Image (tube, rainbow, N blue to C red):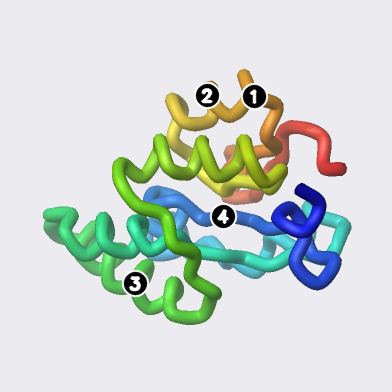
């Protein structure tokens, strides 16, 4: 449905768990998404991603990355997704024609199969996008 895909004429960009960990690990700015998505967009974070972040056991610098990820997630609108994170993101993306930001190779592969655009971190700490944005 057109209204599900766009909110206030903005494309939805979903952040997954490992993408939220990137700023703490690599000093990546989530806001740099605007450099590669040349349309109006809204960043959203699934509630099950936040739950996964809270429950994940990390140590050392990854523990700091987790704290940063949780802090960053507070900036963005939440969407109600439940169950396994990757599966719920796949299902939502399939039904709502949005963009998914992830560095998870398996999830990227599954998204590619259903022709969902993916934002990911490239070498050189830059973001890339794969797929066509309608």
Would you name the residue on which mark 4 appears? 14
Count neighbours of disc 2 (C-alpha within 10 A) and say few if under 14, some if 14 to 19, many if 20 or more.
some
Task: Please determine whether, in this image, residue 105 is positioned above or below residue 15.
Answer: above
Residue positioned 21% across, 65% down in the render: 54
Q: Find residue 70 and name its label.
A: 3
Across and down, in percent, residue 61 comes to 23, 61
**Foreground tag (3 vs 4):** 4
> In terms of secondary structure, where does tag 2 sit?
helix
- Disc 2 versus disc 3: distance between alpha carbons? 26 Å
Secondary structure found at label 1? loop
For label 3, count other residues whose C-alpha is less than 10 Å away and answer few (under 14), some (14-19) or many (20+): some
Q: How many marks?
A: 4
Name which quarter of the figure residue 62 lies in. bottom left
Compute the Cα span from label 4 to label 1.
Answer: 16 Å
The residue indicated by pointer 1 is 114
Quadrant housing residue 48: bottom left
Query: In the drawing, does residue 126 fall left or right of residue 67?
Result: right
As rendered, which of 83 and 128 lies closer to the eye? 83
Q: How far apart are marks 3 and 4 (CA)?
A: 15 Å
**Of the numbered discs in the image, which one, if any, rests on residue 37?**
none
Which is in the foreground here, disc 2 or disc 3? 2
- Dots 3, 4 in contact, CB < 8 A: no
Compared with 12, 90 (above or below) is above
Q: Label 2 to label 1, Cα distance in Å?
A: 7 Å
Pointer 2 or 3: first along the chain: 3
CA distance for labels 1 and 3: 29 Å
Nearest to N terminus: mark 1 or mark 3: 3
Q: Which of marks 4 and 2 is nearer the N terminus?
A: 4
Residue in the picture at 64% in, 24% down: 114
Instruction: Find the distance from the CA under tag 4 to the CA under tag 2.
Output: 15 Å
């Amino acid at each position: 449905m057109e209204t599900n895909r766009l909110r206030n004429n903005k494309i939805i960009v979903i952040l997954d768990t490992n993408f939220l960990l990137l700023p703490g690990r690599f000093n990546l700015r989530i806001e740099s998404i605007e450099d590669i998505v040349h349309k109006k967009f809204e960043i959203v974070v699934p509630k099950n991603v936040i739950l996964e972040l809270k429950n994940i056991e990390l140590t050392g610098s990854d523990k700091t990355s987790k704290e940063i990820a949780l802090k960053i997630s507070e900036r963005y609108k939440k969407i109600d997704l439940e169950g396994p994170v990757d599966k719920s993101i796949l299902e939502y993306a399939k039904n709502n024609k949005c963009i998914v930001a992830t560095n998870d190779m398996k999830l990227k592969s599954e998204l590619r199969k259903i022709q969902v655009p993916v934002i990911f971190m490239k070498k050189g700490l830059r973001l890339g996008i794969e797929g066509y944005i309608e």
